[in-house]
Image (tube, rainbow, N blue to C red):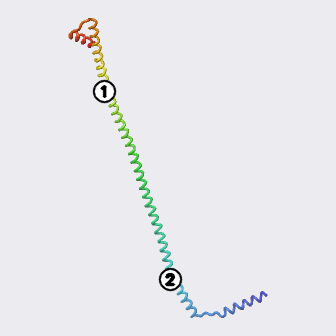
């Protein structure tokens, strides 16, 4: 059975290929059709598709280039901002140091002024105390002298003259 099938298949193939002959008009027509289809696909599909892909590639490349430029600008801006921040920090530190030194100077000046004023007040108080002490001393001497004169008058039982009075007062005042 296998041989019968093989011979049938072989006969069929021979019959099919025997009927095939080379036909020039069909060949030329097929060649023209193939050329037209290739031209049609080339001009209406391939070239527009190629242009579109090229435009898309350029668009993507432009976006990549722009993003790189934007990143570079951002980095430059960040560096600039960092420099400004560092400068500002330095200026702030300097201002703080200046303020501290100025405040210390003001405090020292204030302390010196306060010390001078306290010394002046102390001197004035000492002068006032001395004056009050001398006034007190004079007042006490006057009281003592008046008491002494009164005692002397009682002891002597006579009135002392102004001349004697002054003499006694001067003697007591000197001592």
Question: Of all residues shown, which one is farthest toward the right?
Answer: 1
Q: Is residue 129 above or below residue 50?
A: above
Going from N to C along the chain, the mark reached first, 2 or 1, is 2
Depth check: give the residue in front, 38 or 68.
68
Q: Secondary structure at mark 1?
A: helix
Closer mark to the observer between disc 2 and disc 1: 1
* Quadrant assignment, res 17: bottom right
Q: Is residue 73 above or below residue 105?
A: below
Residue lying at 21% horizontally and 9% vertically, measured from the top left: 161
- Residue beneath label 1, please? 124
Residue lying at 38% horizontally and 43% vertically, measured from the top left: 99
Q: Secondary structure at mark 2?
A: helix
Whether tag 2 and tag 1 are in contact, CB under 8 A, the answer is no
Residue lying at 32% horizontally and 23% vertically, measured from the top left: 129
Compared across the picture, whether 100 is left or right of 134 comes to right
Q: Quadrant of the C terminus?
A: top left
Depth check: give the residue in front, 47 or 146.
146
- Residue beneath label 2, please? 44
Residue density around tag 2, few if under 14, some if 14–19, many if 20 or more, within 10 Å: few
Q: Can you give x and y, in whole percent of width and height, for residue 169 in the image? A: 25, 12
Residue density around tag 1, few if under 14, some if 14–19, many if 20 or more, within 10 Å: few
């Amino acid at each position: 059975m296998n041989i019968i099938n093989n011979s049938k298949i072989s006969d069929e193939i021979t019959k099919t290929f025997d009927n095939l002959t080379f036909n020039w008009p069909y060949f030329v027509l097929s060649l023209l059709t193939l050329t037209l289809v290739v031209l049609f696909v080339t001009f209406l599909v391939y070239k527009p598709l190629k242009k579109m892909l090229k435009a898309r590639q350029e668009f993507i490349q432009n976006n990549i280039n722009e993003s790189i430029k934007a990143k570079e600008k951002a980095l430059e801006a960040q560096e600039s901002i960092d420099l400004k921040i560092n400068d500002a920090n330095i200026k702030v530190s300097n201002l703080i140091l200046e303020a501290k030194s100025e405040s210390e100077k003001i405090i020292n000046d204030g302390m010196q002024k306060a010390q001078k004023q306290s010394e002046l007040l102390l001197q004035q108080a000492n002068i006032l105390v001395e004056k009050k002490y001398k006034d007190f001393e004079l007042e006490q001497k006057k009281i003592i002298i008046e008491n002494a004169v009164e005692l002397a008058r009682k002891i002597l039982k006579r009135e002392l003259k102004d001349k004697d009075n002054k003499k006694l007062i001067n003697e007591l005042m000197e001592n």
